[in-house]
Image (cartoon, rainbow, N blue to C red):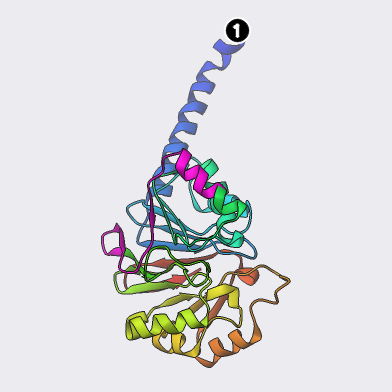
Amino acid sequence: MIIWLKKYSKGLILALFFGAAALVWYAVFAESRRGLEVDFLDVGQGDAIFIQAENGNQVLLDGGPNKAVLAQLAKAMPFYDRSLDLLISSHPHSDHITGLVEVLKRYNTSAAVESCVNYQSPEFSEWENIIENEKIPHFCARRGMRINLDKNLYLDILLPAAAGGFSDPHAGMLVAKLVYGKTSYLLMGDAEKPLENYLVALEGEKLKTNVIKIGHHGSNKSTSESLLGFGAPEYAVISVGKDNKYGHPNKETLDILEKFDIQILRTDLFGTIVMKSDGEDITPR
């Protein structure tokens, strides 16, 4: 054994050296971000949006219906990165929060934000228990909150209008606008038409955006003409499971989007949808 080590020690040292160098360069490449990247993760019939700022801040908004989010995060993040700066729950329905619970179990999380509706489910109870046990700072979202993520990058909470007090998760939905320079993403969660119309009444032309994440997986209960008219997006992202039992996205919704000449990007057709922004333009890939 000693003779073998002496014979091959030079080769082993070189192999270790080149392996370490390759790992260092991989880390440098992985951490060299330019601009903003927003990934609408392919998690099946659910929502999960991963946000990576140029300064390294990482945010996950919703987590989908199961563990699929873990595989998608593994593709989006360096293999050695096991932390997230912020988890956001738009509302506690299982197709949005179940994956967040799995992420909480496996990633170090610095803070959490939720809609704080009066709703209970096994998944939501587990989310609350982990946050409490791990002593993760957490906050109730409310209209007017701004979360600064980087220079010229922030997340504005548009809804709910007040923290807590809602018993219907859809009525107390967390709706946000992610703004980077001159570009923006309107993230609608599962907001339905009555809530959309309320938002239009509050914000009007301030809803103008480059990208809209369509509410409720393309259900005909969401995506009103008034919202699209004021938002005037170039791209519409629909997070939806392939051949799902609900028939999402609904033909009525697709027809409305086509009427407004909005480019439609669907996770059931394209998988994870990655959008890069330099603060001036957004490029999907």
For the point 69% across and 69% down, which residue is it? 242
Badge 1, how many Cα within 10 Å: few under 14, some, many 20+?
Answer: few
Amino acid under disc 1 = Ile
In this picture, residue 239 sits left or right of residue 205: right
Task: Look at the numbered disc 1 and give the secondary structure of its residue.
Answer: helix
Residue furthest out toward the top: 2
**Total marks placed:** 1
Specify whether residue 81 is in view.
no
Q: Is residue 115 visible?
A: yes
Where residue 184 appears, x then y in whole percent? 37, 73
At 46% from the left and 81% from the top, the residue drawn is: 196
- In this rendering, is residue 221 above or below 73? below
Tell me: residue 22, above or below residue 168: above
**The quadrant where residue 151 appears:** bottom left
Q: Looking at the image, which residue sits at the far bottom?
A: 259
Does the magenta-highlighted stretch encompass residue 136?
A: yes
* Image quadrant containing the N terminus: top right
The residue under label 1 is 3
Look at the image and say whether residue 190 sits in the magenta stretch: no
Is 186 in front, or is 181?
Answer: 186
Query: Of residues 219 and 36, which is closer to you in this image?
Result: 219
Residue range corresponding to the magenta coloring: 126-153
Above or below residue 143? Residue 87 is above
- Indicate the position of residue 126 as horizontal and vertical percent values: 56, 47
Task: Please indicate whether residue 76 sits to the left or right of residue 159 in the image.
Answer: right
Image coordinates of residue 208 in percent, x first then y, are 36, 82
Q: For the point 37% across and 80% down, which residue is it?
A: 207
Q: Nearer the viewer, residue 244 or 18?
A: 244
